[in-house]
Structure formats: structure tokens, C-alpha cells
Image (cartoon, rainbow, N blue to C red):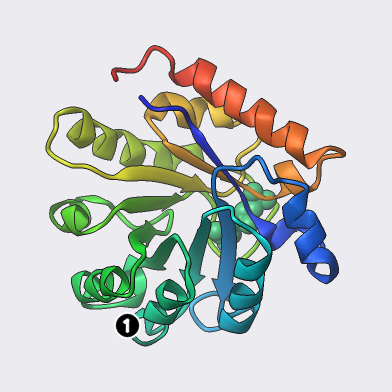
Amino acid sequence: MAEPLIAPSILAADFARLADEIAAVAGSDWLHVDVMDNHFVPNLTLGLPVVESLLKVTDIPMDCHLMIEDPARWAPPYAEAGAYNVTFHAEATDDPIAVARDIHAAGAKAGLSVKPDTPIEPYLEILRNFDTLLVMSVEPGFGGQKFMPEVLPKVAAVRRLVDAGELTILVEIDGGINADTIEAAAEAGVDCFVAGSAVFGAADPALAVARLRRQAAAASSHLTA
Ligand code: DX5
Ligand code: ZN
């Protein structure tokens, strides 16, 4: 497997100092930005104007996680703005392939996310339309929740298809990733680890990113290339 990617989630950062907080994790692979609309999830965070401003202050590829209704309408503008990867939820649309197509046409990679209780089998066939799969390991809506290891079989199922050459996709995991949980996720075959509180809650966020990356690399080193 390639080197693990670490994506700090700014949901756990100080929203009054976002540019400084992002500068503190300059060595990260992706920057994870949680967009919530208070409809798809019972919480409200930030939207396109903030993402546009953040894109001006960082070169870290931006990974926008849209926990919103009607992604067909709202997702493509994040791609047009310059996000690297735009992920929306399988549960939020009847036509995920069309949304992926529009995100690609607007110039970004497209990601599909599934909540903890959503099975992956019905989506395996359409994953070839996506660049990333974001497996939620907490109920979406809030940071700082406990990791749900029961979602890892979904990671392993997709990993098997990738290893068999039947699919090319990066598998991301999001929710409750920290020094105690990242190894299990890495062993299941995760490529990209989102971490909010474990990074921005640390005294030294850059060091936290480096440690998580090292831990994930060690835990996945025996997996097939
Ligand atoms: C939750 C968000 C996560 C959140 C993760 O709905 O999608 O990205 O920030 O936070 P931690 O790492 O604290 O669980
Ligand atoms: Zn997220």
C-alpha cells in the first residue's frame, strides 16, 4: 500500500483562528472540511464562502465532506471553487453517479460517504465512478465521538476489490480516529485517516499528524502492495 494519508478535520480547530490552525498542520496530506446543513445532520458548520476563503490561505489539498441534503445542487460549486476532493453522502441522493459526474466536470475528485449503518454492498457497483470512499466510523454531525470498529468490514470489503484489481479508489475513514484506534483502521486497509480532536486537541498538532501517519504506516506495512 502507498504511504497513509492524514487529513486533519478543522471541525476541532478554533474557528476564530482557522488560517493559523491550518498553518499548524502544514505537513498534512489533505485538509478535511466538514460542511453541515442542520438538515442532513443535526448540526451546522460552514459553507462555500468559508471554503473559498480557506482555499486562499493554504496549499494543502482540500477534502470537503458535505453532510448536506441535495448534493446535486450544492456539491459542484465546491469543486469549482478549487477543492481537491468533494465527498457527499450516499443517503442524501437518488442519483450519486450524476453528482459524481458533475463534481468531476467541475474539476475535483469525487467521494461517496456512507454512515455507520449504511451497508456498502448496494454501492459496490457504482464505486468505479468515484475516487474516494469515506466510511463514517461515528454518526456524522459531531467531532469527539467514539470510534465504531463495527464499520471496518466495509473497509475490508472494498480493500479486497482494490487489491484484486477490480477497483481503483482511496478508502477514507472519519470519526474517532486517534492513537488508540488508527491501527485497527490501518489493518483493515484504510488509505486516508481523518482526525479532528486527535490533531487539533493535541499540544502540537503537527507532531500529532506525524505520529498518526507513522502508526498507520507501521500497522499497514504487512498488507499487500
Ligand atoms: C463528524 C465529522 C468528522 C469529525 C471527526 O461528522 O465528519 O470529520 O470532525 O472528528 P473526530 O476526529 O474528533 O472524531
Ligand atoms: Zn468529516
Among the 4 quarters of the image, the one containing residue 163: top left
Towards the viewer: 205 or 41? 205
Q: Viewed as shown, does residue 107 lie left or right of 64?
A: left
Q: Viewed as shown, does residue 198 lie left or right of 163?
A: right
- Residue 110: in sight, yes or no? yes
Mark count = 1
Expressed as whole percent of the image width and height from the top left, the position of residue 190 reads 41, 35
Pick out the residue farthest to the bottom.
73
Expressed as whole percent of the image width and height from the top left, the position of residue 55 reads 60, 68
Towards the viewer: 218 or 81? 81
Residue in the picture at 22% in, 35% down: 162
For ligand 1, the image quadrant comes to: bottom right
| Vertical relation: 7 (above or below) 122 | above
Q: Viewed as shown, does residue 168 lie left or right of 51?
A: left
Mark 1 near ligand 2 (CB under 8 Å)?
A: no
Towards the viewer: 220 or 49? 49
Expressed as whole percent of the image width and height from the top left, the position of residue 167 reads 17, 42
Residue in the picture at 65% in, 63% down: 142
Residue in the picture at 26% in, 73% down: 105
At label 1, counting other C-alpha atoms closer than 10 Å, the crowd grade (few under 14, some 14-19, many 20 or more) is many
Residue in the picture at 60% in, 40% down: 177
Q: Quadrant of the N terminus?
A: top left
Pick out the residue farthest to the top.
222
| Vertical relation: 184 (above or below) 22 | above
Q: Quadrant of the C terminus?
A: top left
Q: Which residue is mark 1?
A: 72
Label 1 sits on a secondary structure element that is helix
Expressed as whole percent of the image width and height from the top left, the position of residue 206 reads 75, 38
Tag 1: residue type?
Answer: Ala
- Residue 145: in sight, yes or no? no
| Vertical relation: 46 (above or below) 218 | below
